[in-house]
Amino acid sequence: MILVSVMYPGGAEPAAFDLDYYLKRHMPLVRERWSPMGLEKAEVVKAAATPDGSPPPFQIMALLSFRSLEDFQKAAAAHGKEIFADIPNFTRAQAVVQINEPQAW
């Protein structure tokens, strides 16, 4: 399994972010397109704070669990353009995407 993190920068002056659109339109699009292609779980987290009180480096993160890296690559190839083309509908922030390998401990 892999975990794909899609992170939208925050900081002192974060770009505007339409969370309502993101939750009601964008994430359902992601789920609809990618679930048949190996997306097993999708979670959205909104930054609340940092331990030292500084602005959080990311304001919103989507955590997407896929069965394998190959499944994610196929899903991204098939529908990535459509999904990323929707980003300007909810923010001007540039998404940072990171592929992670969960570790058992």
Image: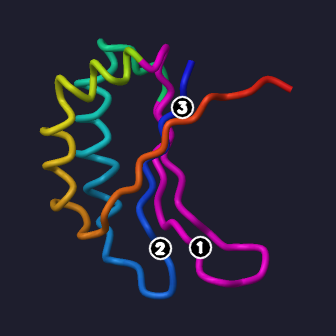
Q: Amino acid at mark 2?
A: Gly
Q: Amino acid at mark 1?
A: Pro
Query: How far across and how far down the image is residue 82, in percent?
Result: 13, 38
Query: How far across and how far down the image is residue 81, in percent?
Result: 14, 39
Is disc 1 in contact with disc 3, using a CB cutoff of under 8 Å?
no
Q: Under tag 3, what secondary structure?
A: strand
The stretch in magenta equals 42-69
Q: In the image, is residue 77 above or below residue 67?
A: below
Residue at the image point whose x is 79% and y is 23% from the top:
104
Query: How far across and how far down the image is residue 71, in percent?
Result: 37, 15
Tell me if 24 is positioned left or right of 71 in this view. left
Q: Quadrant of residue 103?
A: top right
Is disc 1 in contact with disc 2, using a CB cutoff of under 8 Å?
yes
Rounded to the nearest angstrom, the CA distance separating label 1 from label 2 is 6 Å
Residue at the image point whose x is 26% and y is 29% from the top:
76
Tell me if 45 is positioned left or right of 30 in this view. right
Residue where numbered disc 3 is placed: 3
Q: Under tag 1, what secondary structure?
A: loop
Instruction: Indicate which disc, 1 or 2, sits on the residue closer to the N terminus.
Output: 2
Q: Amino acid at mark 3?
A: Leu
Rounded to the nearest angstrom, the CA distance separating label 3 from label 2 is 21 Å
Look at the image and say whether residue 51 sits in the magenta stretch: yes
Tell me if 100 is positioned left or right of 15 in this view. right
Crowding at dot 2, Cα within 10 Å, few <14 / some 14-19 / many 20+, comes out as some
**The label number, if any, that marks residue 56 in the structure image:** 1
Instruction: Indicate which disc, 1 or 3, sits on the residue closer to the N terminus.
Output: 3
